[in-house]
Image (cartoon, rainbow, N blue to C red):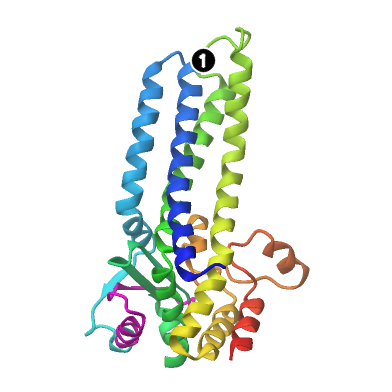
């Protein structure tokens, strides 16, 4: 039977697996490019680059995400209510106090990032602070602290950097292969097969990126909802917060698709009718209505 600890171990394995797959993909692209451009230096660069990017994403991916949204770090004197809610819930959960950030955006939303519980950060939008009451804010913060306790944050943050670079490199290889920039003769024995494999991989890379984001997001949101509700002992607080967040309808400013899976709810707002149902197949979050229904059944 799965427990919180087995799920934490699964998240650790997923993180290392993602890093390993990233290395293999970059090395394969480097090998194909080195053969195509008649330069072994490209392969050596790909190996070094894949190792560097894994190290870089582990240590700095959280800072990249926070800077993307111009998040401003706050202390107790700046946001007393937010600080005290986080502090009290951290004591209850047995977690160290994370760094707190506020994103200047009227759309209500929040996310957690970092590499572990000792180096974690929670960011909320100014719209979230304006819209929610204390019980609802506690529900949202408990949800984000659960992501930290469940070891979701490293996996979710690393995905932003690694998947983004895979997509960029694959796109570069695809464009250069199609235009035949300095490559060897397409008719040379075996050359066509390798080029085709490289092009196919480049075409599929963005799809793989989306599938990875979908795979890591939906189940962990349900778990964080449940863990957060148990932490506050008041599921209605988070359920009510999700209603308000989803009811806002308008997207965040300057939102990036690569980071959408990190937020408590989709930062792109919601559609209506059949369009909403069709879009839900490709969204990084489970339907809010389902999450609210499960939370209220816990009560």
User: Residue 148, percent across and down?
Assistant: 39, 69
| In-image side of 198 versus 14 (left or right) | right
Q: Which residues are magenta?
A: 84-108
Residue at x-position 50% and y-position 91% = 234
Residue at left offset 34%, top offset 62%: 114
Question: Which residue does the numbered mark 1 point to in the structure image?
Answer: 183
- Left/right placement of residue 106 relative to residue 210 reads left
Vertical arrangement, residue 198 with respect to residue 81, above or below: above
In the picture, the quarter occupied by the C terminus is bottom right
Q: Where in the figure is residue 269, as x and y percent of width and height?
A: 59, 71
Residue 106: horizontal and vertical position, in percent?
46, 77
Residue 144, horizontal then vertical, whole percent: 43, 74
Q: Is residue 181 left or right of residue 55?
A: right
Q: Toward the viewer: 238 or 8? A: 8
- Magenta stretch: residue 218 in it? no
| Residue depicted at 43% across the width and 80% down the height | 142
* Whether residue 62 can be seen here: yes
């Amino acid at each position: 039977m799965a427990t919180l600890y087995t799920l934490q171990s699964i998240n650790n394995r997923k993180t290392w697996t993602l890093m390993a797959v990233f290395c293999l993909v970059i090395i394969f692209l480097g090998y194909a490019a080195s053969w195509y451009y008649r330069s072994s230096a490209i392969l050596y660069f790909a190996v070094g680059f894949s190792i560097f990017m894994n190290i870089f994403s582990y240590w700095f991916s959280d800072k990249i995400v926070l800077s993307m949204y111009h998040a401003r770090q706050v202390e107790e004197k700046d946001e007393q209510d937010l600080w005290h809610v986080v502090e009290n819930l951290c004591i209850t959960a047995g977690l160290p106090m994370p760094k707190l950030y506020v994103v200047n955006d009227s759309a209500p939303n929040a996310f957690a990032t970092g590499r572990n519980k000792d180096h974690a950060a929670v960011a909320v939008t100014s719209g979230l602070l304006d819209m929610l009451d204390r019980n609802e804010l506690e529900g949202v913060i408990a949800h984000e602290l659960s992501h930290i306790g469940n070891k979701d944050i490293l996996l979710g943050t690393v995905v932003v950097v690694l998947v983004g670079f895979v997509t960029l490199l694959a796109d570069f290889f695809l464009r250069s292969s199609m235009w035949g920039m300095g490559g060897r003769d397409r008719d040379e024995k075996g050359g066509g097969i390798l080029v085709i494999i490289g092009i196919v991989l480049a075409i599929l890379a963005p799809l793989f990126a989306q599938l990875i984001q979908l795979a890591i997001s939906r189940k962990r949101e349900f778990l964080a909802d449940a863990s957060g509700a148990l932490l506050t002992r008041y599921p209605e607080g988070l359920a009510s917060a999700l209603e308000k967040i989803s009811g806002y309808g308008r997207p965040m400013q300057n939102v990036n698709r690569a980071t959408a899976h990190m937020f408590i709810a989709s930062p792109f707002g919601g559609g209506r009718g059949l369009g909403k149902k069709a879009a839900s197949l490709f969204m990084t979050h489970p339907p809010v209505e389902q999450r609210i229904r499960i939370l209220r059944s816990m009560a």
